[in-house]
Amino acid sequence: MQKILLKGRNVNIKNPNPNIKEIKTLAELPSGTGHEYFINSHGLEIKSFLKKDYSFLYITGLSAEDGTKISILDITLLNNIQNGIHADQCNIVHIYSCYSGAAQHHLNCIHGNIVLCTYNKASDVNVILLAQSNYDARIKNDSSLIEYIRDNFHLLAASDFSISYKLDDQIYNFSLSADEIKKMKSIEELPAFLHKKYDAFVKFYTKIYAEYHESYPEIFNLKIEPEPKALTQADLIRVFNRVVVLEVYNFNKSSLSNIKTMLNQEGLNINICIDRAIRQGNCELLICLLNYYNTKEVEPYILDKAIERGDINILKAILEHSTTKIGSYTLNQVIERGDVNILKAILEHSTTKIESYTLNQVIERGDVNILKAILEHSTTQMDFYTLAQVIKKGDVNILKVVLEHNTKEVEFCSLFLIYQAIERGDVNILKAILEHSTTKIGSYTLNQVIERGDVNILKAILEHSTTQIESYNLAKVVEKGDVNILKAVLEHNTKEVEFCTLFLIYKAIERGDVNILKAILEHNTKEVDSYNFNLEILFNDPTVNSYNNTAEETNDVENTSTINTMLNVVEEVTILGESSE
């Protein structure tokens, strides 16, 4: 029989067999003889709502009473398939979908002859991987249906397989149930159970075969083998694994007891079960599954799943497992999530270590609460690069949190932080550092600020209690030639500035900068005598005293600036080198 694949519009599973025809619209359905159809619509519930025909294998969502959306694969799809064949023909239809077993209850609504195969109960959700496995086992080979059932009978028993024959308006059904397997403690009980069920199926099929093999030779082209396929230890483990997985997916009141019983069997792979327990938020089930691991290490992706869910109880259950380890990837994932409670739970784990790049990631993120949690961890260490990142970030709140992290590293690097803030020109950052710092502001730092020429930065430095102004700094101010910088320094009323007034005046005169000189004289409170200065800049000012000082003759001096009236004027004199009249 020709095999045909129909996929739901949202189904992404690829067709693995190029010999199988794939169709997407009902208009493409063949007519005449029977075919073997594979309806792949995992995620769509099967019900018998009598709705209009759809041009695509696609069902819109309906709303339940509680407002929940329900996807419906209408039974009319099967009738569309059936309507195209002759009365003496028969189709085989496989449905791979959660709740697919519901279709078995509506055979009386389906026209014509059909063999319907479903792979789980009407009330149960199937797992996409299990449905895919059954699908692949049938669709990839050219064996007859009865050969497929015999070869895969153990797996079909684990997934509640059901097959119905509707022939000449008579319905015959055979169903397998995993309920008995759920109560088994080990695979040693499986062979006898499977043999018993296979014998029952042989009797079922033999009876139908005897009655219909002449009428429908393409359906009954082989007699069934009386003995089941021989199974290996791995085959039996696989059966147990499937039943555990399905019980986890269809968790109910009795499931935990069943799962605990089946977990007595060694060698099971329960990663998919753990993933499901995390998604369900089922902490009791999760702990039960984790206990099965014993000394086996919990996979990192399991921890990542718990973090992604954000359930603190689920996360703690995993963290309490003896083999759980926290890697840098996991820690970074938690930081990106931004959940402080989740982060604190991770930080409490004994294997957590904070690397410098993790701290830098937190600083860049700019979340104060996350940063505080990281800084409180015993393994967190500061270095120059990290502190430079804080300054570069320019976030005062982040800086304050780092500065409050009272460690030798922060204290040792205070001067480095100050230099970085000065270079950046960020007054708020600088003030925050200065408020915290006990570092003495020396002449070198002050000169750096003077050279930069930023008045606001300079004022912030001058306001610090440890700032000291040396003659070296004052000379730098005059050399800079910036009146605003000079005024800011002069307003810093300290003994050093007062003591060095004459030094400043001398430097200004030596430089020949009238504006700087004026600014100094306007601030000066000392008497200034002309004999202190033997420079031409004073010779043109009528208020300067003449105490036998000598000077070179000056011609056509244009600048006649007025020195502060606080100068002590003794008498007017004739400037040497000029004649009096």
Image (cartoon, helix red, strand yellow):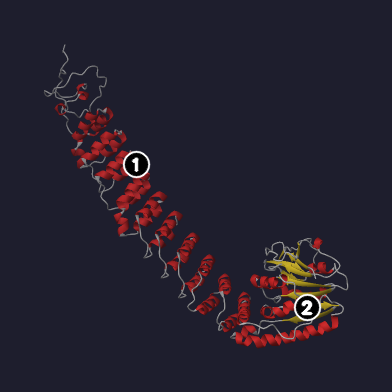
Q: Quadrant of residue 325?
A: bottom left
Three-letter residue code for mark 1: Asn
Q: Secondary structure at mark 2?
A: strand
Q: CA distance from mark 2 to mark 1?
A: 88 Å
Relative to residue 346, is residue 400 depicted above or below? above
Question: Which residue is at the front of the view, 8 or 449?
Answer: 8
Q: Which residue is mark 1?
A: 456
Question: Mark on residue 487?
Answer: none
Q: Position of residue 419 (x, y in %)?
A: 32, 47
Residue 81 visible in the shown view: yes
Q: Earlier in the sequence, mark 2 or mark 1?
A: 2
Q: Position of residue 171 (x, y in %)?
A: 82, 79
Which residue corresponds to the image point at 84% horizontal and 72% vertical from the top-left?
A: 111
**Quadrant in which the N terminus appears:** bottom right
**Quadrant in which the C terminus appears:** top left
Q: Which residue is mark 2?
A: 164
Tell whether 401 sits left or right of 537: right
Q: Residues within 10 Å of mark 1 (few under 14, many from 20)?
A: some
